[in-house]
Structures are given as C-alpha cells and as structure tokens.
Image: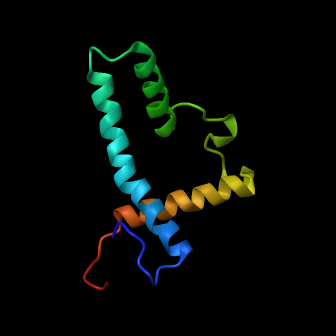
Amino acid sequence: MTQDSPDESPSEALDRNMRRIRTEGLDAATEAAITLLRDPKAPAQAKSATINAVFRASGLLGRADEDAESELHEMTPEQLDREVKRLTREMARVSKPGVFD
C-alpha cells in the first residue's frame, strides 16, 4: 500500500511509512552507498560522507563509552532498555517455529 486509504488514521499512515523507510528505504540507501563507494569517478567528499554514514549506521562510529558492554547491575535505565530491545530483536531473529509452536 503506497497511498492513504480513507479509513487509515494519521497514526497508521505514519506507522506504514516508517516501516517502509526502515525496510525499502534502508535497502535503497545501502545499495546507493555501496554503488557510490565502488564508483571510481565519485567525488572523494561524497565517498567520505558515505563512509562516515555507513560506519555510523553500523555502530562503528559514535559509540560512547557508556554504550560499551556493562554488567546488568551497572547499566542505566536507558542502557537496560536498549539491551532488552536488542535481545528481543535477536530472539525474534533466531527463533523458529518448532513442533510445539
């Protein structure tokens, strides 16, 4: 679905479009970044900005020391929340329906 339907609320439209940005948009941005980085004629400034964006998106840049792995009892509420979300995503990724599901 790419257009608002008459019965779609603004919140639903926002959710739908955010989902597209995180899926289709991320795929397109990744492909464009890799294409640009492989282009020998691309300007160095564009490549530098792209490299920074790719590294930042992958978590290689901009990591503060507080984001380093800590023991659970040492984490702030924000760190605990991020860890719970990360673990939830990881569980969803690796869990597969079994015989009893």
29, above or below 85, in the image: above
Rendered image quadrant of residue 54? top left
Q: Residue visible at 31% across and 31% down? A: 34
42, above or below 88, in the image: above
Where is residue 89? Give x, y as percent.
46, 61
Pick the residue in front: 75 or 42.
Answer: 42
Where is residue 91? Give x, y as percent.
43, 64
Would residue 88 be found to the left or right of residue 74 on screen?
A: left
Pick the residue in front: 94 or 71.
Answer: 94
Q: Residue visible at 33% across and 18% down? A: 42
Would residue 11 be found to the left or right of residue 96 on screen?
A: right
- Quarter of the image for the C terminus: give it: bottom left
Where is residue 60? Give x, y as percent.
51, 32
**Across the whole image, how many numbered discs are drawn on residues?**
0
Q: Residue visible at 48% across and 60% down? A: 18
Where is residue 32? Give x, y as percent.
32, 35
Rendered image quadrant of residue 10? bottom right
Residue furthest front in the image: 6
Q: Please, which colouring scheme is shown?
A: rainbow
- Quarter of the image for the N terminus: give it: bottom left
Pick the residue in front: 100 or 27.
Answer: 27
95, above or below 56, in the image: below
Q: Residue visible at 74% across and 53% down? A: 76
